[in-house]
Image: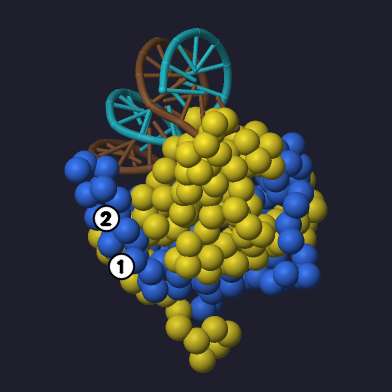
Chain colours: A blue, B yellow, C brown, D cyan
Amino acid sequence: MKTADAPPVDVFDATSASRAALELVANKWALLIVPALRDGPLRNNELLRRIGGISQKMLTQTLRDLERNGLVLRTDRRSVPPHVEYALSDVGRPLSEAFVAVGCWAEAHHRDLADARKAFDARNRG
Amino acid sequence: MKTADAPPVDVFDATSASRAALELVANKWALLIVPALRDGPLRNNELLRRIGGISQKMLTQTLRDLERNGLVLRTDRRSVPPHVEYALSDVGRPLSEAFVAVGCWAEAHHRDLADARKAFDARNRG
DNA sequence: CAGGATCCAGTGGGATACTG
DNA sequence: CAGTATCCCACTGGATCCTG
């Protein structure tokens, strides 16, 4: 044992189901939507406002994909005006924990990245 | 406090540096390459073999991007035949931990996803 | 071995307009 | 409010060939 217990291996196989699962969530919108739902269900408009830069199209599209694969539960209150809530399922929740960690990493290191980029670009000019 | 201590918020701002950092790593190849390097440095060909389905082009391109932003360190042994090694930096390593967790989630739940998909597709036909 | 260069099909994703 | 539908372009990324 090195650091964690069970290292993933199957995801490295391009034809495996676990690789397909990984590719499903390996995009920036999923990486933002899933953590956004961690503190409780949110409505369409709430997600639109919380996640800066996302379009209605991509929100719906990603949400549908996540719902189809059972990561997100969609609840239609069937009222007027419409009221639809999106919540994490028991399958989606553990993923949100991992994604929150990614978000924290970004918050913690974005300055390091900027510095490295400047150094790299300077090196590759002189 | 709910589950973790510091929830990321800045990543939700489309213009923030942390969002840019997140978008840098929010793609499937980064999500595979970074964890692949967790057990020690690897060479170009070793990565090509380990990560099924990746092309030489995407490997080089993603590696360059990660190197430029300081997540990956490139070491050229300057020998004949060529010998180049890629390793995680101190900035990249914590990210690899989070990404390994994502991989583990995929390994653990890919069957759930397949089941949910079947149910969803059946529901949306009848 | 490690890669750069080029060509090109596929698609991710924005803008806009419409609906129940 | 919570979507759907259409147009359309920029970029992703594979295939192929070439180099030190």
**Tags 2 and 1 on a common chain:** yes
Disc on res. A119: 2
User: What is the crowding at mark 1: few (fewer than 14 residues within 10 Å), some, or many (at least 20)?
Assistant: some
Residue at the extreme bottom: B1
Q: Is B80 or A81 nearer to us in this picture?
A: B80
* Mark pair 2, 1: CA separation: 12 Å
SS at mark 1?
helix
Amino acid marked by disc 2: Ala
Q: Is residue A91 visible?
A: yes
Per the image, the residue denoted by label 1 is A111
Q: Is residue A86 visible?
A: no
Q: x, y (%) of residue B124?
A: 68, 43
Furthest residue to the left? A126
Q: Residue at x 53, y 69 (%)?
A: B94
B72 horizontally vs D11: left or right? right
How far across and how far down the image is residue B77, in percent? 50, 43
Q: Image point 57% across, 62% down: which residue? A: B96
The quarter of the image holding the C terminus of chain B is top right
- Indicate which label's residue lies in the foreground, 2 or 1: 2
Residue C8 pos. (x, y %)? 43, 12
Q: Is residue B123 above or below residue C3?
A: below
The one nearer the camera, B64 or A9, is: B64
Of all chains, the one bearing label 2 is: A
Q: Residue at x 58, y 66 (%)?
A: B98
Q: Chain of mark 1?
A: A
The earlier-in-sequence mark between 2 and 1 is 1
